[in-house]
Image (cartoon, coloured by chain):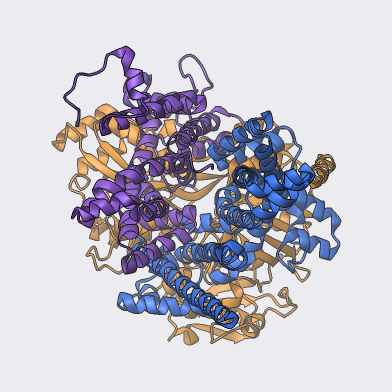
């Protein structure tokens, strides 16, 4: 009957499908997590995956060397000058570059792109507005001086690296003005359309993006430099490490981006798979709210720094995924402090707690995002805190829920991951070492503010460091701030993240940069 | 209630219980329970189900004595250890003893099941009997509300509720209870409707009993048997829903040893460390199977009219 | 006389129809109220959900006003109902697109899966139920009962993972998660959204075969649950029919046994069976939440779960509303069958 027909159909399919084809030679198939992408408009992108994609679809005025972030070079800009007063930057733009649409890239596009970031005023707009640009003054401060020359005027003579690094970030992407305006609605400068489309001059252009499902890029025939070997890049959303691993092992994909430590072991024995690692700028830290009556005691803060099994976590749950790092500037940044004075030392912690009159310990809560590795880290910290009688209650929650609480300063301890917004040290100093107004109404909701850490002195130091022009002096200032931070701050920096990439052995040339907006697909060959 | 007269001796007990012409209400009731038990004990699968549940309750009570380790104790050096005499079910990604976690997890399972039954069944029976007995506008209103809740798909309403209330085992219980009571209300109402027009209810009403006494004293007890069947059968579903919520990360939160959450945690290790996911999943299966078996058996005993 | 009866019947039918419409309206409003209230008790700052963690205070204020969060609750509800009625479910935070558009995009995948699962369930569950009813107490009857019980007791997400581990990872018999192999993605234009149909329309038989092999495992899994339910219901419906007098009459008349069973008895179960199938289809839509998560199936279930985990409340409530409305539709459909088609209910 019909049933047998059905069974026969199923069986014939089974027989037909035991062979799996390898991926085509000019297509790169990658498994990644796409669920953090909420927009593809470079004026709005503020997420890791989105930043990586934007870097492959758009060019920026300048870029930095992924191996040595200190080396800055021009991309869309051929050259630039800085005026004597340190406030005026003049850029000369390459003549002859084209967007994927075929339109020529001119000074108009550069002015339009930077101005629309300020006008749209989305989350990452501060990267430019912190230099004094406002919708009111942007026409005088971001100016076209010729068909291929542009002048930018900032409000203070900041360290040049600070401004230049900010231009290398995603909001500095140059957008095709004509294309964007063609799709503009209600004066949104094409924002609605650019959320789900691309209009750049980068090596790839967006074919389709289905949220949390798939994203496909196609090579840009107009690209100004060497054409990429891959004609198509398919990024498939695969949230689970085990699934990514098996897809990779079977050759269904060429590259897996989110392999967890435990799957790494299984993969490393496979000769047809290569594993690569790159230390990224993201830090894992604990924020101790100074509104809590225990956590505001200096000895308690220091005691907790000795109650974390840094080495134990590094070698087990974070194996290969993170490296111990205990200062607010991540390794690879200008002025980063590499010293790691803290390790699990229960006796020392007990002594410090006794000094604070808390030899019997105390109870405290910790808000944790319900994702890995945060949960595992929290459980491990819970266990090591208990060694000195500190009873830690874990409150897991969804990301935004936990963040809402953190922003309201309603937490005790918060376990977080912080990624720098640009390559200049000010990005982290700004948030961890500055708190201009500690009142509940404070407008600048830095991490220091969120943990109610009132530090007028350190705020002044951070403000001075970003204006310092001499790099060596600047490095010294940051080192000093980080040491002071380690002695007193309500932040326990624990680890710096390592990006793990697993690829089929026939895939070559994919460079991993220090941040996600410098992972370039155009160098990949197969 | 116990009559003053001398109790029958053992040999006569059976015939007293099975008498076709009971001399008192007590004898009739005792006889009914006894023959029910007889029927039930003949149903082997139901007895199996009941024994598993009793065994589970025993494990839950004795958990601290049975479990060799603290279910929350992490030991990073001994993570993902295979099955061994030291760890009967191996260890998980944080080096916790899976056997101990499953043993303690039985408490959470019973907690969820018990709490849902305690919240949803009484709510359902009260609303259903009131609605059925009083009829009229109150009936229409109550049944409309019931219909609205019934219109929602259970799991999805539970998901939306948990999303709003925040993940956690208490909220999962609330969400499941909120989605469970309407079915009970419907059953209780249907039973009430048939009972309402029965002669004996009329008789009681003529004696001057008020609606409150009739509902609580006469109708509710008679609705109980079909409700118990339904609740028992539902418990399997409740366990699966709670585990599903835990699996999605919306039920019990780490580090609590809830079986669904343990299954979810083991998902990452399915390729190399099968025991981390297989064993908690099997535990869920065994317990929900036990409730299904018991429910099936109870239905045959208590509610023979409904064939399915 | 005839006329009066006729009029009376029309009147009664009309009365019922009006009553039903009122009930549907009330239920819909209740649905809306429920989703609205759920949306208001979330401990997540809805503004933060839109603007993100690093937005400035000024952006924050602007969005707060845009969302109408400063208005009294009843006015917010009014705005909400008005928006929903005009098809505006809000914008998903996660995908930055209108929720209604998202649902329209992902829903076909879920329906495709549920349809195939229902087919599997119907073609295996109903014959199984009939056989069990005819040969009560036989080995097959017992087997069917045990399979049913197991189906009712197994966590679907766990069974799915085990299935993937065995058939994909270990035996390499079936393809892995997803609707189609990754490099076939986006090769067929989504005309209907149902991938299998789209492949046929485009004549892409290779992709069709690949897609079909991808759907086998999740559909069989859901089909198993559907089978467990359908065989149980069919069995009891058939037992009730087979005990009826007309069956005895038919048998006495000497009508062949297979015709008595497949013709007479089954014919009389038709309406309740359709209802049962519709119910099972509805519960498959719901069961897809867990299955799709396990199989990375890009349908409504996965969309809902993703949104839930990211506290994307517009999407969650929109999805809930849509599934709720479909459930309501299914209930209405079965009520309709009983009310107007079943001669006994007249």
Q: Position of residue C88 (x, y in %)?
A: 51, 76
The reply to whether residue A508 is visible in this rendering is no
Drawn side of residue C18 relative to residue C244, left or right: left
Q: Colour of chain A?
A: orange
Image position of A289 (left or right of A22): left
In which quadrant of the rendered view does residue B212 lie? bottom left
- Picture quarter with the N terminus of chain A: top right
Find the residue positioned furthest to the front: C1
The answer to whether residue A321 is above or below residue C186 is above
Q: Outermost residue, left direction?
A: A357
Residue C135 placement (x, y as % from top left): 68, 34
- Eyeballing the image, is B32 above or below A378? above
Residue under the point 40% across and 60% down: B146
> Can residue C29 be seen by looking at this rendering?
yes
Residue A229 sits above or below residue C214 on the image: below
The spot of residue B145 in percent (x, y) is 38, 64
Q: Which chain is purple?
A: B
Report how many numbered discs are placed on residues in the image: 0
The x and y percentages for residue B33 are 35, 30
**Nearer to me, C268 or A285:** C268
Quadrant assignment, res A264: top right
Q: Residue at x 16, y 32 (%)?
A: A354
A61 or B142, nearer to the observer: B142
Nearest the viewer among A341 and C127 is C127
Residue B50 lies left or right of residue A298; in this view the side is right
Which chain is painted in blue?
C
Residue drawn at x 54%, y 82% is A188
């Amino acid at each position: 009957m019909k049933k047998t027909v059905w069974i026969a159909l199923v069986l014939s399919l089974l027989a037909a499908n035991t062979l799996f084809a390898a991926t085509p030679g000019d297509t790169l198939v990658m498994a990644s997590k796409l669920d953090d992408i909420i927009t593809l408009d470079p004026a709005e992108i503020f997420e890791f995956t989105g930043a990586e994609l934007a870097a492959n679809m758009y060019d920026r005025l300048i870029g930095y060397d992924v191996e040595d972030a200190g080396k800055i070079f021009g991309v869309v800009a051929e050259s630039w000058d800085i005026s004597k007063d340190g406030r005026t930057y003049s850029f000369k733009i390459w003549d002859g570059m084209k967007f994927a649409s075929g339109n020529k890239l001119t000074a108009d596009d550069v002015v339009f792109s930077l101005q629309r970031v300020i006008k749209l005023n989305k989350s990452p707009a501060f990267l430019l507005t912190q230099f004094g640009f406002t919708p009111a003054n942007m026409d005088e401060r971001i100016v076209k001086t010729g068909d291929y020359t542009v002048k930018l005027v900032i409000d203070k003579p900041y360290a040049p690296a600070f401004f230049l690094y900010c231009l290398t970030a995603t909001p500095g992407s140059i957008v095709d003005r004509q294309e964007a305006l063609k799709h503009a609605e209600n004066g949104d400068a094409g924002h609605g359309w650019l959320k789900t489309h691309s209009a750049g001059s980068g090596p790839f252009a967006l074919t389709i993006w289905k949220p949390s499902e798939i994203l496909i890029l196609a090579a840009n025939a107009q690209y100004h430099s060497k054409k990429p070997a891959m004609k198509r890049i398919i990024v498939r959303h695969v949230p689970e490490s085990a699934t990514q691993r098996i897809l990779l092992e079977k050759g269904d994909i060429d590259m897996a981006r989110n392999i967890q430590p435990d799957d790494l072991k299984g993969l490393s024995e496979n000769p047809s798979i290569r594993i690569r690692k790159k230390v990224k700028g993201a830090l894992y830290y604990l924020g101790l709210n100074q509104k809590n009556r225990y956590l505001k005691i200096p000895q308690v803060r220091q005691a907790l720094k000795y109650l974390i099994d840094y080495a134990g976590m590094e070698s087990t749950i974070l194996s290969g995924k993170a490296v111990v790092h205990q200062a607010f500037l991540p390794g690879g940044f200008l002025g980063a402090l590499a010293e790691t004075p803290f390790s699990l030392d229960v006796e020392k912690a007990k002594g410090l707690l006794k000094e604070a009159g808390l030899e019997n310990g105390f109870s405290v809560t910790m808000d944790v995002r319900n994702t890995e590795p945060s949960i595992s880290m929290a459980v491990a910290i819970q266990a090591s805190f208990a060694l000195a009688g500190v009873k830690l209650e874990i409150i897991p929650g969804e990301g935004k829920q936990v963040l809402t609480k953190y922003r309201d300063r309603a937490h005790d301890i918060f376990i977080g991951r912080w990624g720098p917004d640009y390559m200049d040290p000010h990005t982290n100093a700004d948030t961890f070492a500055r708190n201009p107004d500690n009142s509940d109404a404070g407008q600048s909701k830095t991490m220091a503010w969120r943990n109610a850490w009132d530090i007028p002195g350190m705020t002044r130091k951070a403000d001075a460091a970003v204006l310092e022009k001499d790099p060596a002096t600047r490095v010294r200032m940051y080192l000093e701030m980080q040491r002071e931070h380690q002695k007193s701050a309500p932040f326990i920096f624990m680890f710096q993240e390592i990006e793990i990439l697993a690829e089929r052995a026939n895939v070559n040339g994919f460079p991993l940069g220090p941040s996600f907006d410098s992972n370039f697909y155009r160098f990949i060959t197969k | 209630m116990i009559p003053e007269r001398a109790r029958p001796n053992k040999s006569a007990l059976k015939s007293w219980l099975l008498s076709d012409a009971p001399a008192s209400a007590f004898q009739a009731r005792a006889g009914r329970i006894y023959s029910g038990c007889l029927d039930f004990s003949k149903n082997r699968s139901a007895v199996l189900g009941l024994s598993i549940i009793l065994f589970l309750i025993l494990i839950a009570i004795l958990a601290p004595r049975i479990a060799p380790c603290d279910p929350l104790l992490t030991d990073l050096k001994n993570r993902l250890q295979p099955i061994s005499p030291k760890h009967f079910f191996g260890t998980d990604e944080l080096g916790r003893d899976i056997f101990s976690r499953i043993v303690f997890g039985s408490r959470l399972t019973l907690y969820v099941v018990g709490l849902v039954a305690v919240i949803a069944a009484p709510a359902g029976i009260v609303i259903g009997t009131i609605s059925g007995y009083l009829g009229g506008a109150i009936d229409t209103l109550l049944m409309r509300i019931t219909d609205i809740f019934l219109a929602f798909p259970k799991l999805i309403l539970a998901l939306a509720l948990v999303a709003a209330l925040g993940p956690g085992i208490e909220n999962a219980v609330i969400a499941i209870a909120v989605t469970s009571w309407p079915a009970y209300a419907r059953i209780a109402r249907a039973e009430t409707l048939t009972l309402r027009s029965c002669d004996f209810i009329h008789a009681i009403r003529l004696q001057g009993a008020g609606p409150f006494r009739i509902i609580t004293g006469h109708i509710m007890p008679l609705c109980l048997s079909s409700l118990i069947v339904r609740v028992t059968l539902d418990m399997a579903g409740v366990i699966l829903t709670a585990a599903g919520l835990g699996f999605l990360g919306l039920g019990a939160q780490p580090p609590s040893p809830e079986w669904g959450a343990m299954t979810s945690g083991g998902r990452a290790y399915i390729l190399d460390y099968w025991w981390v996911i297989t064993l908690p999943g099997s535990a869920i299966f065994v317990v929900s199977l036990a409730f299904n078996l018991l429910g099936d058996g109870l239905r045959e005993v208590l509610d023979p009219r409904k064939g399915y | 006389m005839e006329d009066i009866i006729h009029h009376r019947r029309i009147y009664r039918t009309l009365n019922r129809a009006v009553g039903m419409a009122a009930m549907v309206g009330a239920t819909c409003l209740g649905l809306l109220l429920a989703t609205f209230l759920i949306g208001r008790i979330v401990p997540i700052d809805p503004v933060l959900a839109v603007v993100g963690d690093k937005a400035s205070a000024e952006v924050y204020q602007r969005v707060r006003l845009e969302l109408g969060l400063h208005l009294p609750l009843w006015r917010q509800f009014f705005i909400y109902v008005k928006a929903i009625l005009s098809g505006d479910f809000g914008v998903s935070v996660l995908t930055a697109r209108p929720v209604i558009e998202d649902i329209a995009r992902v829903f076909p995948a879920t329906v495709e899966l549920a349809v195939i699962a229902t087919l599997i369930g119907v073609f295996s569950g109903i014959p199984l139920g009939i056989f069990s009813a005819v040969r009560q107490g036989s080995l097959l009857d017992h087997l069917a009962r045990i399979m049913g019980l197991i189906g009712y007791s197994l966590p679907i997400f766990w069974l799915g993972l085990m299935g993937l581990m065995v058939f994909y990872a270990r035996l390499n018999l079936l393809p892995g998660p997803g609707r189609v192999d990754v490099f076939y993605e986006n090769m067929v234009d989504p005309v209907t959204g149902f991938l299998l149909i789209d492949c046929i329309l485009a004549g892409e038989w290779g992709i069709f075969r690949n897609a079909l092999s991808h759907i086998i495992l999740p559909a069989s899994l859901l089909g198993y649950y559907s089978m467990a339910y359908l065989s149980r219901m069919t069995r009891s419906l058939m037992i009730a029919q087979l005990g009826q007098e007309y069956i005895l009459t038919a048998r006495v008349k000497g009508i062949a046994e297979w015709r008595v069973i497949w013709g007479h008895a089954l014919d009389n179960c038709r309406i309740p069976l359709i209802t049962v199938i519709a119910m099972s289809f509805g519960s498959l839509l719901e069961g897809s939440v867990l299955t799709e998560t396990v199989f990375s199936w890009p349908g409504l279930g996965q969309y809902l779960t993703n949104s839930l985990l990211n506290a994307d409340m517009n999407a969650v409530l929109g999805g809930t509303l849509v599934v709720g409305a479909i459930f309501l539709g299914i209930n209405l459909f079965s009520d309709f069958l009983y009310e107007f088609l079943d001669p006994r209910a007249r």
